[in-house]
Amino acid sequence: MNWLLPEYIADALPAEAERIERLRRTLLDHFRSHGFEFVMPPMLEYLESLLTGAGQDLNLRTFKLVDQLTGRTMGVRADITPQSARIDAHLLNHRGVTRLCYCDSVLHAMPASISASREPVQIGAELYGHAGIAADITVIRLLAGALKTIKVPVSRIDLGHVGIFRALAEAACLPQEAEGVVLDLLQAKDVPGLVEACADVPSPFREALQRLPQLYGGVEVLDRVAAHGAQCAGRLLPVRDAGNRKVAPAYLDELRCRVVDAGQCGVFSQREGVGLYGGGGLFVPTYPDASGSGRPMRSLLGL
């Protein structure tokens, strides 16, 4: 009998399983101490519900199957974030701010990176009902505090905002299909591909889109972004505020650098906001991928 597991799928043996459970409990307790309520969405949902508001990247990562009871297409969740949003919008219907957290396995049709599992444990916290920068800052602080609680050192926080790209795409009247292509090229930092894809985009939007991957550095980068497109001006303030030391807690001020990446754009969700990973990331030494991420920053992932 063949006991081999599928590619990028692995067992968690006792020592690792105990460590994961200890981290899970510690992080969920941290979220709960900040007023976040725990929810447990199902592993399977009808596809139209599971992918509502999601981008093409999440669609490609989602395993799909046919429900033998109804004949409808179902999906195995690749991300708990949309499920949490569905619970908030259609089941809880709270007035004002809602804080939810979760922790469970998700399944990816393809691994996120060469070192990633296709069945990662996703732990996160979502803040709904407040569209202002204060909500983004709250979750930045929550994430940094969570990593501090489990003694994970942080070397860098990258900030991004999908609205910068969306403002340029809208001003350039990019068709939806072309917008998706350009967005994928930005995510991959494929500058030659971006130049080719933007060949028919009118000036000055063509030049502005092509410069986005190069606009990377401190908060001063936002001044360079503004110089390339007045359409982005209203989208810059949240990123500037999030990168400002005045709104960051003490342990964020101790970071060696806080980076703004204008070429990072969240692709999992159509919501706008200051973002981590898909729109930036929080990085720790010796680990190649972002340890904390979000679409936007009001979602944070780990483990």
Image (cartoon, grey):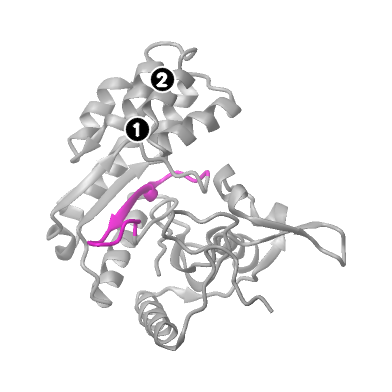
Is residue 260 shown left or right of residue 1? left
Vertical side of 103 occupied by 48: above or below: above
Q: What kind of residue is marked 1?
A: Gly
Which residue is painted at 35% across and 32% down in the image?
234
Across and down, in percent, residue 126 comes to 45, 63
**Residue 137 vs residue 129, the one in the foreground:** 137
Is residue 40 shown left or right of residue 271? right
Residue extending furthest toward the front? 1
- Reply yes or no: does residue 277 show up in magenta: yes
User: Is disc 2 surrounded by few (<14), some (14 to 19) or many (20+) residues within 10 Å?
Assistant: some
Quadrant location of the N terminus? bottom right
Vertical side of 17 occupied by 194: above or below: above
Whichever of callouts 1 and 2 sits on the residue coming sooner in the sequence is 2
Q: Quadrant of residue 262?
A: top left
Q: Which residues are magenta?
A: 270-290
Across and down, in percent, residue 133 comes to 33, 50
Which residue is painted at 59% across and 62% down in the image?
83
Please give the residue where the numbered disc 1 appears in the rendered image: 234
